[in-house]
Amino acid sequence: SQTMTNKEHQMLRTASLKIIRALGVEGGCNIQFALDPKSTNYYVIEVNPRVSRSSALASKATGYPIARVAAKIAVGKRLDEIPNAVTGKTMASFEPALDYMVVKIPRWPFDKFASGDRIISTQMKATGEVMAIDRCFEAALQKAVRSLEFGNRSLLWEDSKWEMGTNVSSYPLEPNDLRLWAIMAALRRGITTQELAERTKIDLWFIDKLQNIVNMEKELLSQPLTPELLWQAKRIGFSDEQIGTLADRLPEQVRQLRHSWNIRPVYKMVDTCAAEFDAGTPYFYSTYEQENEAEPFEENKAVVIGSGPIRIGQGIEFDYCSVHSAWALQESGFKSIMVNSNPETVSTDFDTSDRLYFEALDEESLRDILE
């Protein structure tokens, strides 16, 4: 968590262990808390003594195979007897350590049900979800937004029906699927981060990160593209298309320009140990840094493009096809390379294919992987 203090984190961790021991749970269990931001009071919302969608998300975010470990515990093994399948050198008792950021965004169906009630409450309305990984929150968020596959709706999108002014109360900031874009629109028009935090009750840390994105938008609008500016924009997750829109260039022109300046993504490994140990997991995400950890295969290889988030008309049966495509390639002597952004699927298990890239399924990301 980015907004809890270490004391709060340890408090909830201790409470989780006490609850699990009191219930006598051995295996997978996730506990959800609500923490009062103005005190140390917390409330248990739910306890799931089983492998759930939350477990699947946690497994994909950390690389720690919760379901596999839970199954081995069920047959009598202890954590210190179960090898970590990712590193091959540590045991399951070693807690995952992360050196990256993970963002999950629900995939709501209001593109199909435009007249539906968009207000978010205790009733689940999303049909699916996407996950994105990068080195900083801004980049992971922008990557996750692109993964939603709402046409070309990046964070630059604004609804023409919104009445936007200099007063925070004029913005549609009620909890719904468009609030993120409404906050971005408000920041562009000078509404302060403090005003938005007070109005929405979203932690100021997140609003400040959105302000960083808006500040970069303004730089791209007002300054000529230089290697340094383009590098900084890519570091915080701007796509070639977004940069082109702001800098008055075509996306392909931006791509050619960054290639001429040798600005290309590298791929980092999800290894559960923040690079403390050598790991051989074929699970990667893109970022803009110097060192690349994904060496290209020398053998015959083929890329399987996953189906993205579950939505109306496109369900889990498409992922079934992706998984069997990867297996068929392996049986035919090809290295199978999976690209997908959906943490709910079997295709994004790190051992389903020979290599997994957890990436948005847009043209830029796919071309970067192929190149």
Image (cartoon, helix red, strand yellow):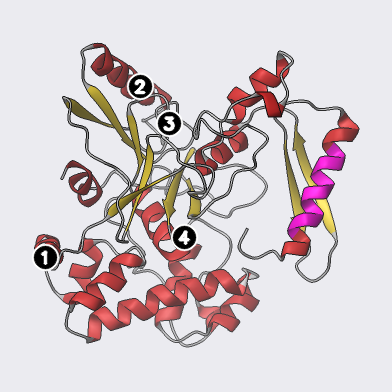
Check if residue 60 falls in the magenta segment.
no
Sequence-wise, the earlier of marks 2 and 1 is 1
Q: CA distance from mark 2 to mark 4?
A: 33 Å
Measuring 26% from the left and 61% from the top, which residue is drawn there?
239
The secondary element bearing badge 4 is classed as: loop
Which residue corresponds to the image point at 58% horizontal and 34% vertical from the top-left? Answer: 90
The image quadrant that residue 71 belongs to is top right
* Gap between marks 2 and 1 measured at Cα: 35 Å
Q: The residue under label 2 is which amino acid type?
A: Val
Q: Which residues are magenta?
A: 9-19
Characterize the local packing of mark 1: few (<14), some (14-19) or many (20 or more) Cα atoms within 10 angstroms: some
Residues under numbered marks 2 and 1 in contact, where contact means CB atoms less than 8 Å apart: no
Relative to residue 81, is residue 106 depicted above or below? below
Tell me the CA gap for discs 4 and 3: 32 Å
Of discs 3 and 1, which sits in the foreground?
A: 3
Image quadrant where one finds the N terminus: bottom right
Q: Which is more foreground, mark 4 or mark 3?
A: 3
The amino acid type found where label 4 is placed reads Leu
Q: Mark 4 highlights which residue? A: 178
Give the residue at mark 1: 250
The three-letter amino acid code for the residue at tag 3 is Phe
Above/below status of 211 relative to 239: below
Horizontally, residue 284 falls left or right of residue 80, namely left
The numbered disc on residue 323 is: 2
Which residue is tagged 3? 350
Q: Nearer the viewer, residue 39 or 265?
A: 265
Lower sequence index among marks 4 and 3:
4
Q: Is residue 300 left or right of residue 56?
A: left
* Residue 333 in view in this figure: yes
Write down the quadrant of residue 201 in the picture: bottom right
